[in-house]
Amino acid sequence: MSELTKILLVDDHQLIIEGILSCLKNIDGLEIETANSCDEAFSKIKSNLQINPFQLVFTDLSFDNQSQNNNLDSGEALIKAIQDEEIPIKVGVITGHSETNRVFNVIHNLNPSAYILKGNCSTDELNFAIQKMLKDEVYYTHEIHQKLLKRALVEIQMDDVAIQILKELPRHAKISNLEGLIKKNDGSLLKVRSIESKLSKLRTDLQANNNTDLVLKAKELGIVD
């Protein structure tokens, strides 16, 4: 078996692949292959399992070159396929997607070993991520780590009443219309003044300018759909 660390890089944009390769070429001890689709990547991973298997795969999340013949239409689908078949390979994400909701869903549901943003990708960061992954450790780029931390802090501050208000708010033109809809834990209904007080605190917690901005930020954080 090769002493090199064998890596598969998956992205549908050749310029992105070339950019990442230019960073990886400065790291010693790597053997790198590429794939332009998730189906191609999965086929390469499986066909190399018995002889010189890949140890790491880095994939984007969104792929624009999909057709009806593709079985795996996203990086999430590729990661899930690898996990479903229990293939012994460490998976990292290199993507432009930094939306808190998507980041949270990918990490919460798929638990990749790395999450790196294309805009911040560098030789040093990739080398650090690779070394962490090979040690069974996790690496998230600083911006991703901060987004997850912020979401966790906001989620701690959220209670059932807050969630109810945030879900109902876009459906009503006036705050007064929420009266009779929002229930406390004991089943009693919140009065308008209590709802307005809760909204004021939520705007402060999420640093929202108004109620519309509040709902947008709650959606961005994945607190509400």
Image: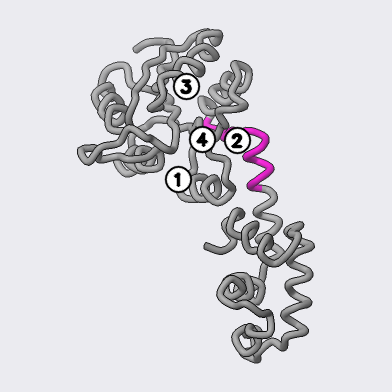
- The numbered mark, 2 or 4, whose residue comes first in the sequence reads 4
> Residue at 57% of width from left, 35% of height from top?
138
Q: Nearer the viewer, mark 3 or mark 2?
A: 3
> Residue at 79% of width from left, 62% of height from top?
204
Residue 51 shown left or right of residue 211 in the figure = left
Q: Label 3 is placed on what type of residue?
A: Ile
Q: Nearer the viewer, mark 2 or mark 4?
A: 2
The residue labelled by disc 4 is: 113
Q: CA distance from mark 2 to mark 4?
A: 8 Å
> Residue at 71% of width from left, 64% of height from top?
157
Q: Label 2 is placed on what type of residue?
A: Tyr
Q: Label 4 is placed on what type of residue?
A: Ser
Q: Crowding near pointer 1: few (<14 within 10 Å), some, many (20+)?
A: some
Q: Which mark is residue 203?
A: none
Question: Which region shows up in magenta?
Answer: 136-148
The residue labelled by disc 3 is: 16
